[in-house]
Image (tube, coloured by chain):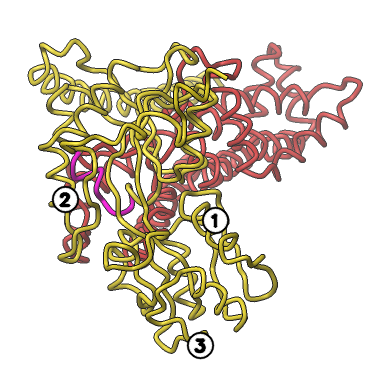
Amino acid sequence: MTFDLIVQFGLALFELPFREGYVSSIIYVSLYVSLAAVALSTLFSIPVALVVGLTDFPGKQFVKSVINTGMGFPSVVVGLIVLFAVSNQGPLGSLELIFTKQAMIMSQFVLATPPITAISLAAVTGVDESVRDAARALGGTRFDVALVVVKEARYGIATAVLAGFGRAISEVGSVLIVGGNITGADGISKTRTLTTAIQLEARQGQYETAMVLGAVLVALVLTVNAVVVRFGDRGVQR
Amino acid sequence: MTIQRRQFIAAIGAGAVASTAGCSQSAGGSGGGDESGSDAGTGAGVAGETLTLTTTTSTYDTGLLDEIHGDFEAMYGVSVDAVAQGTGAALESARNGDADVVMVHARGLEDEFMRNGYGINRRDLMFNDFVIIGPEGDPAGIQGMGSATDALTAIADAEATFVSRGDNSGTHTKELNLWEAAGTDPGGEWYQETGTGMGEALNIANQQGAYTLSDRGTYISQRSEIDLTILVQGPIESGPEILANPYGIMAVNPGVHDNANYDLAMAYIGWITSPSVQDAISEYQVNGEQLFFPEAVSEDPDFQQYVPEGWSSESTDE
């Protein structure tokens, strides 16, 4: 509720032609899709980073270069691939995911996973060997050792999650293709995010409103970053 | 170490709670919508369903669909997902079975879509017209020309900057047809394909002082933002007939895509071609001007609206 009030107040300052609930609903969709995608990516990436970072196996360098290549994967290409997957004719067509938040989460998962994995991997690899040895010497299981490594690498992993979040929330190409930028007739966003709303305003020549939405997006990213950094600092005081 | 592990797990738990809080909020929101919807449409038997409409940027960006869709959603207790894509992409989505109904403005592409079996039950919906707009200085001297093709030829001869949509949209298709009719093959530094929607193309043309072809609706809705003026009028202001811009609506053939929501698509077509909604379309104004002229209600229906142009039962017997 306070969130809605703040948004309403902010909009009143600019006297923008937005209907009630419109901006808060696109902020909600942006956060929902990006956070869900980043949460899934993180759950996937950290185990992968731990396995790749802490074990040796043939083809390890190849896996690393695949992950690094993924960081530069163009978002529109990811959007197209996910579109083909979830389209009615595609392998997941029967699930009817096209133009839904779920499809957007899928494409953002694909986009956010490589940076989160790559940066986590660098962080995990950077943890001193002696920490692992100590954990093992104290009778820790493999899981305990992994937890210790995660704990030691938490700044790097937090950076990884933030990088993934930044990629997800600022991305416009794939969510536009698979989400369809849909808002209901009541002005409540279904698959419209801040980025696709900005794109729509720019398409209509409404540069001022596009700028305001852009400012909202930047403020949102700053807030999330601040929260995560704060979280990390508290960990230090313990 | 156990304490830290507990904190780590607690953090994950907090994250999970936060994300499910988001979920329940959305479920609550849409649940509320469903309730009010089912109240309104208990008899319809489609309440709670979603109709996916792929359409052009011009119908969406002018605000028309947002204006009229509330009525349909309340009447049937459904929601309409309008996806603004441009005619080519809108038809392609429907071809892939990702839409239930399409509203576009390129008769040639619509005919091809129907002939290939993807679209059925086509209706003429409404029309407006295209206008050729450009800078007030008018370097190619086309102001007031009675022929759109002469105007384009003059622009090409003057090599004055022309912004093309370049996106396989209805407007782009019309523009290519006009160049062909003018007997000119546009190309060179002055001809810029932008690959954007109409609004963006207008902005690009505005920033470069260039000419472009626009539908009247999008131009009117953006006129206050840009410095370009209408130099060649369309048929609404007694310009050449070649600049007419008719919109059609079609249901996706459930015989090709059995997941298409055909019942609801037909309900939508029936609704939008009904006298009251056609009136609402003609009453829709932006900046004090009417954008779309209804075409569906007629004492003397044009039978060609239901089939690909030029089709007749005799010709297919051969």
Which residue matches tag 3? B139
Which residue matches tag 2? B282
Pick the front one: A181 or A57: A181
Q: Where, by quadrant of the figure, is residue B280 drawn? A: top left
Pick the front one: A208 or B119: B119
Question: Residue B209 at what x, y percent from top left?
Answer: 48, 81
The answer as to whether the residues below labels 2 and 1 share one chain is: yes
Alpha carbon separation for disc pair 2 and 3? 35 Å
Chain shaded yellow: B
Pick the front one: B77 or B309: B309
Q: Where, by quadrant of the figure, is residue B176 drawn? A: bottom right
Question: Residue B144 at what x, y percent from top left?
Answer: 37, 80
Q: Which amino acid does label 3 sit on?
A: Pro
Which residue matches tag 1? B177
Residue that appears at 52% across and 84% down: B140
Residue A34 seen from this side: no
Q: Quadrant of the N terminus of chain A?
A: top left
Provide the residue span drawn in magenta. B60-68
Residue B170 seen from this side: yes
**The magenta stretch spans residue B65:** yes
Residue that appears at 43% across and 37% down: A180
- Considering the numbered disc 1 on the image, is that residue within a helix, a strand or a loop? helix
Which numbered disc, 2 or 1, marks the residue that appears first in the sequence?
1
Left or right, residue B276 beside residue B15: left
Question: Residue A117 at what x, y percent from top left?
Answer: 67, 33
Which numbered disc, 2 or 3, marks the residue that appears first in the sequence?
3
- Considering the numbered disc 3 on the image, is that residue within a helix, a strand or a loop? loop
